Amino acid sequence: MRKFSGAEKQTISSFASGLSAAILLIVLISLVLFIMLKGSVYFWPSQVFKVITYDTPNSEVSAFVPSSVNIDEFNQALSNKLNAQFSNSTLPMPLMVVEQVDAVYQISLYSGAIQYGTFQQINTPNSERYQLAELSDVVADVAIFQNQLHDIQTNYLTVLHRKIALLNQSGVGEEAPARLKELEQFTYWQQKAEALRQKLTSYHLIFIDASGQPFDVLVKDIHHLFQPNVMSLFDKFSYSGNKIIEFVSESPKQASTSGGVFPALFGTVLMVLLMAVIVAPFGAMAAIYLHEYAPNNMTTSVIRICVSNMAGVPSVVYGVFGLGFFVYTLGGSIDSLLFSDALPSPTFGTPGLFWAALTMALLTLPVVIVSTEEGLRRVPEGLRAGSYALGATKAETIWKTVLPVASPGIMTGVILAIARAAGEVAPLILVGAVKFAPSLPVDGEFPFLHLERQFMHLGVFIYDGAFHNQTNTQGSSMMFASCMLLLIIVFILNLFAIIVRNKLRDRYVRI
Amino acid sequence: MLKLFETETLSLDKLTDEQTAIKVNDFSVWLNNSLVLNNINMRIPKNKITAMIGQSGCGKSTLLSSFNRMNELNQKYAFSGEVELDGRDIYNKKENVAKLRTKVGMVFQRPNPFPMSIYENVCFGLRIQGKTERRMLDDIVETSLRNAALWDEVKGRLFDSALLLSGGQQQRLVIARALALKPEILLLDEPTSALDPLTTLHIEELINQLKKTTTVVIVTHNMQQAARVSDYSVFLHQGELIEYSDSDSLFTMPAKKQTEDYITGRYG
Ligand SMILES: Nc1ncnc2c1ncn2[C@@H]1O[C@H](COP(=O)(O)OP(=O)(O)OP(=O)(O)O)[C@@H](O)[C@H]1O
Ligand SMILES: [Mg+2]
């Protein structure tokens, strides 16, 4: 058998390690690229085709289909539908024709729904028929009416309603002139609002769908209206720019298949920051105790081993613990002590933001303890001695000299904790993250930060998105877009923590 | 041997308690279960300079740090005997160690500046004592740095990190740091080992100045330095006190053969 010489061994091992590094890099890059590719479909306007499927020579079904839809899957779904219609006939696989129609419009509604059609006409209340060129005038009119309606609602109706309610409270008689006056006002504005609403519903656009049937859309419902097949590159970019802004700033629509993910983004960042605020001091204190105060004996070593092993406990176990202990036991007792008048409906005794942050803090505590201890171990003995020799007590020494030098270690722990917490799903579902939360955990209502509320989380949102129908391209591309956003968020949070760490390192650690 | 600075010498055997700064009685130290100092007895005279000489590893640093209980930071540390300051055993249970260390300052063998600005390094001890008045701190920082012959080099960058200073500058900084507290006793462990001859001379002058108000104990490997600056010298060998007398006699006519061998350089 041939033996490798030393130099050859070196070449082989350096080649092998280079190769594995390259493979890792490729896997990583292709993962990111794949997610980006799939996710970008959500933002990029896709071409729309008219697909005509002939089942038998005299039965045809047509539809406008965006190119982002997988045609095969679409076809499958369509043929299932056809087969259902003609269930007793034995028919061959349907024949399909794809046509390009330049004039087709994509109509995105505020509700999140998307429709396709070719334009026919604009209908207005005075039943004049406008041409498409005048669409912008019509849209401007509608916007004016909508503003007026909004104005009436906030400035008159709500105000009057409150006044009347106050009068009712103070026991003013039904027929009191003050009350009657307000009521009269109220009815007047209500009628005005109703008239405006009527007016708004009489501005329609009429489109024709792929099979030639006209359908109409209320102008006030239209969010975007554009012709994807004849869009210039600039228009496409500005469209995706708008879509991206919408994605990060708006709420999900249409059962989380369109719209934005702002609540989930906000919930993720808030939960992670809360967790960091909880875990950093606790982790640091525990590590300081273990390293500086605990006697160097068996018990301490056992505790240390336990801490490292805690990092390996499956996260769902933490979730179950959080639900059982934090939510039911702790939250339940808080409720019975402080919010007993609200019982039996729970305030803190139900999954919520605070319990989620606490559970995640517990989950990431070992990481922070271990890396803080690593940081403490790196503090030179001479530094401690120098501080003691100037008359500092142990606490002063730790606080003023040891902790600053160990702070990059704490930050390393926090960085790892953030990455972990932002990506967890299983424990979060148990302790407070939901796929749809009616309100954000922060609002203008006292006490502004509502720790007991349920919240949305990107990881949970993605997990939920994975259950959407595969043919609903819109939904699954939104899931990939959310994935991309999660990656970016974790990256930004980490970058921020790394910058802080490097600042600390420059400041406190010998170069 | 030439003495630079003239001082009156007291006879060590006849020191009264008044004239004694530190009294060491039957003091032994074990580190890691091995005997490092063996039954030391000595009196260190007040407001004088005492030099400690001896081979590397003979226990000089250990003895020095017994005077402000810095030894205790070692995990495996044991001792017997007493160290008396102002007539009280500093190893008594009720001793306020932090306060003791403000009175007995120490400069370590290896410079250990804190990762803070030069200014904050010097006023670290003062801040610990709760002194925050800016004017006073400024004054003390300047005097201490001047005394440590560092002021001219750093006056323009007092708020830069102390870690950017050179080794020798760091050594002077930690001297200034100890001086800022105006200790009654100053323990110097090879304070000039990283300094050039001229700066060394500065520090030696400073030590001589300090003598008016401070008792100085200095460890050095430099025989000339010991002879130049100290009033008294003690020679340690393998944890035992071999000879202790005024520096003139110790360096010109040592009583013990071992001392003579060491100062004439016959030991490794
Ligand atoms: N933490 C420790 N644990 C065990 N032994 C120690 C420890 N520190 C010092 N020693 C030992 O104690 C002895 C005395 O050390 P010490 O530092 O006092 O010597 P020194 O005289 O100051 O030497 P040098 O001139 O090299 O500084 C040495 O043999 C050393 O190995
Ligand atoms: Mg030493």
Image: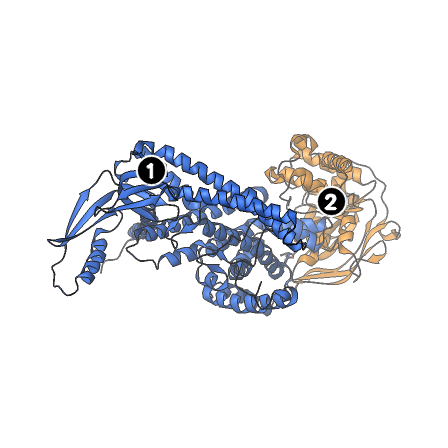
- Which chain is home to disc 2? B
| Numbered disc 1: secondary structure | loop
Q: Is residue A129 above or below residue A10?
A: above
Q: Are marks 1 and 2 in contact (CB under 8 Å)?
A: no
Which is more toward the observer, A305 or A16?
Answer: A305
Task: Rate crowding at label 2 as few (under 14), some (14 to 19) or many (20 or more) other CA atoms within 10 Å.
Answer: some
**Could you tell me which residue is drawn at 25 percent across and 38 percent down?**
A229
Q: Amino acid at mark 1?
A: Ser
Q: Residue A127 bears which disc, if any? A: 1
Which is more toward the observer, B252 or A203?
Answer: A203
Residue B12 appears left or right of B261: right
Which is more toward the observer, A261 or A313?
Answer: A261
- Which chain is home to disc 1? A
**Could you tell me which residue is drawn at 76 percent across and 47 percent down?**
B129
The image position of residue B74, as x and y in percent, is 66, 58
The image position of residue A110, as x and y in percent, is 39, 46
Q: Which quadrant would residue B193 be assigned to in this image?
A: top right
Q: Is residue A131 visible?
A: yes
| Numbered disc 2: secondary structure | helix
Chain B visual colour: orange
Q: Amino acid at mark 2?
A: Arg
Residue A183 appears left or right of A34: right
Q: CA distance from mark 1 to mark 2?
A: 85 Å
Residue A139 appears left or right of B169: left
Which residue is denoted by mark 2 in the rendering? B127
The image position of residue A391, as x and y in percent, is 74, 50
Q: Nearer the viewer, mark 1 or mark 2?
A: 1
Chain A visual colour: blue
The image position of residue A65, as x and y in percent, is 24, 48
Q: Is residue B261 visible?
A: no
Q: Residue A342 bears which disc, if any? A: none
The quadrant of the image that shows the C terminus of chain A is top right
